[in-house]
Image (cartoon, rainbow, N blue to C red):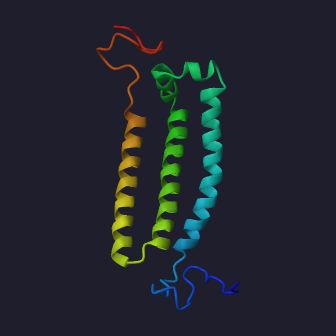
Amino acid sequence: MSTDSIAAPRSNSAQSPKYKRSKGSNSSFEMVAWLFMRLSGVVLIVLIFGHLFVNLMVGDGIHAIDFGFVAGKWADPFWQIWDLAMLWLAILHGTNGVRTIINDYAERAGTRMTLKTVLYVASAVIIVLGTLVIFTFDPCPPGAVIDLPSFCTVP
């Protein structure tokens, strides 16, 4: 039986490649990103459980969730801001996590740059589209006569 041990990943052993990336600048971006992940995670827990409580426990529960329920919630600016904060924090939190994974596992600079560009563009598109949906949502579209929420006036 052999007593050889397996070297840790990315260690400077003969079997693993040397870590070739530069140390980087002396900016505090990574510290701010690390702190953002912790703080946004705590805020997201409050936002998500508040969202779940209101949607599933208050009123008729899951059976009440339909177009009218969402329209009624988004008629109130409080719930628009709540959902907007949840959307933005979730996307930014996830983007920061995936950025960290890309930095850790993409070995070539070109690959890192390409992956992070795709990540940032996708995140920006989702944030813009989600924000537009929340703030331009019309619960009482003109010309609609069926399935309108109870607070809509029927023409």
User: Between 107 and 54, which is closer to the camera in this rendering?
Assistant: 107
Vertical comparison of 34 with 44: above or below:
below
User: Between 142 and 33, which is closer to the camera in this rendering?
Assistant: 33
Query: In this image, 143 relative to 51: left or right?
Result: left
Query: In this image, 107 relative to 85: left or right?
Result: left
Q: Residue furthest front?
A: 1
Vertical comparison of 145 with 45: above or below:
above
Residue found at x 41% / y 48%: 127
Q: Residue furthest top?
A: 155
Image coords of residue 48 (percent x, y): 60, 41
Image coords of residue 52 (percent x, y): 62, 34
**Figure quadrant of the C terminus:** top left
User: Between 25 and 6, which is closer to the camera in this rendering?
Assistant: 6
Q: How many marks?
A: 0
Residue found at x 65% / y 44%: 46
Query: In this image, 125 relative to 70: left or right?
Result: left
**Figure quadrant of the N terminus:** bottom right
Residue found at x 34% / y 60%: 118
User: Between 14 and 150, which is closer to the camera in this rendering?
Assistant: 14
Q: In terms of image quadrants, where is residue 30?
A: bottom right
Image coords of residue 93 (percent x, y): 53, 56
Residue found at x 52% / y 50%: 90
Image coords of residue 4 (percent x, y): 66, 87
Q: Residue furthest left?
A: 143
